[in-house]
Image (cartoon, rainbow, N blue to C red):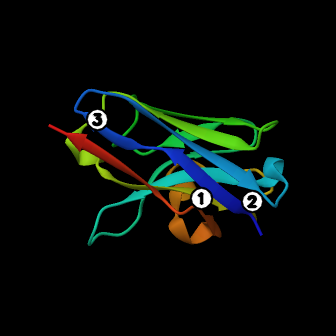
Amino acid sequence: QVQLVESGGGSVSAGGSLRLSCAASGYNYKRICMAWFRQIPGKGREGVASIAADGSAYYADSVKGRFTLSRDNAKNTVELQMNSLKPEDTAMYYCAANTGSAGVCFDGPRSLQIYDYNGWGQGTQVTVSS
């Protein structure tokens, strides 16, 4: 079973930047579609971005052009660079793994369907103040 450990996050003013990292272990990393989700209290978990083993990424419309997702298959890590942060980006951010994907993510929004992901990190808080 894959284990995911997140780091990064914190508090920043609107317009600022943060970087989230996630380290994976316990599974062949090159056979995992990775993603980030976020959640605010009282709402469901929302997909932010996904990335396949070949580095191809998909972004939710709400973060497109501001967030960049990358992965290092040698280090078994994935990083989410978040720029031009807005107060509405405030949430708990979760790293997720789809180990049934053979490293390929579904196309487009389908890649951010929560039920496809069977490995989750503990979450890291991002707070953006106005």
Name the mark on residue 12.
Answer: 3
Q: Amino acid at mark 1?
A: Ala
Q: Is residue 105 visible?
A: no
Sequence-first tag of 1 and 3: 3
Q: Nearer the viewer, residue 90 or 110?
A: 90
Residue type indicated by callout 3: Val
Q: What residue is drawn where x is 42% and y is 43%?
A: 9
Q: Secondary structure at mark 3?
A: strand
Q: Can you tell which of label 1 and label 2 is closer to the viewer?
A: 1
Q: Secondary structure at mark 1?
A: strand
Q: Which residue is mark 2?
A: 101
Q: Is residue 51 left or right of residue 122?
A: right
The residue pinned by badge 1 equals 96
Tell me: 2 left or right of 59.
Answer: right
* Residue 15 versus residue 109 in the image, above or below: above
Residue 32 drawn at (x, y percent): 74, 54
Considering depth in this image, is 109 or 128 the residue closer to the camera?
128
Residue type for callout 2? Ser
Whichever of callouts 1 and 2 sits on the residue coming sooner in the sequence is 1
Residue at 40% over, 35% down: 64
Secondary structure under tag 2 reads loop
Q: Residues within 10 Å of mark 1 (few under 14, many from 20)?
A: many
| Label pair 2/3, CB-CB below 8 angstroms | no
- Quick one: 10 or 84, which is closer to the camera? 10
